[in-house]
Image (cartoon, helix red, strand yellow):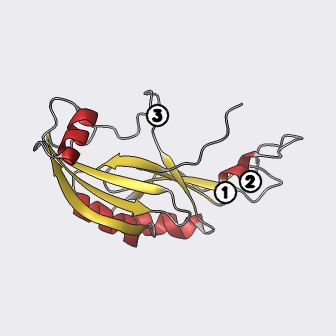
Amino acid sequence: MNSPMRMNHIGISVPDIDAAARWYCEVLGCYLLVPPVEARNDGSHFGNVVKDIFGDRFESVRMAHLSTADGVGIELFQFVEPATRAPADPFEYWRGGIFHFCLTAPNIEAVAERIAQNGGKVRSQVWKLYQNKPYKAVYCEDPWGIIVELCSHPYEQFWSNLAPAPQPYEG
């Protein structure tokens, strides 16, 4: 049997890494571990590593490393060559792949409002999911189109020990 693994980090591409690093720290409360640095296809060891990962078109990227309160990393990328481009519709949830990440916050309403006041947007209402549980969730978007879900309680608490299954909220 395989042991459960811990989440290490998520990588996010943005068109302005300086603004994004600042926003994620100021608005979402992340810690800046490593400020933006450049990696190039220059024959150095690290240059060879990133070239191997990103392939033949890769020439240059800026990266910053942040952390959430529980130590999960957020690795920001601003591709310089080829340049980062934002999708026309950042919320193509029907497309395969990751379409959001989620943070736990005790007051999701306040965080959603802070996101909206700082260039992001609130995409949904704040929803209470079950009548017999105080668990709430809301979908938001950062200024670069990255979908950020906010949940009021930790994931395991949200979804474990639901037998008998809670009734959907009808309030």
Check disc 3 and give the amino acid type: Tyr
Q: Is residue 145 visible?
A: no
> Does residue 35 lie above or below 76 as drawn?
below
Mark 3 or 1, nearer chain start:
3
Secondary structure at badge 1 equals: loop
Q: Which residue is mark 3?
A: 93
Q: Which residue is mark 2?
A: 157
Q: Which mark is residue 154?
A: 1
Q: Is residue 4 visible?
A: yes
How far across and down, in percent of the image, does residue 157 sit? Answer: 74, 53
| Quadrant location of the N terminus in the rendered image | top right
Secondary structure at badge 2 equals: helix
For the residue pair 141 and 154, the one nearer the viewer reads as 154
Which tag is nearer the camera, tag 2 or tag 3?
2
Label 1 with label 2: CB-CB less than 8 Å: yes
Q: What whole-number distance in Å separates the C-alpha atoms at marks 1 and 2?
A: 5 Å
Q: What whole-number distance in Å separates the C-alpha atoms at marks 3 and 1?
A: 23 Å
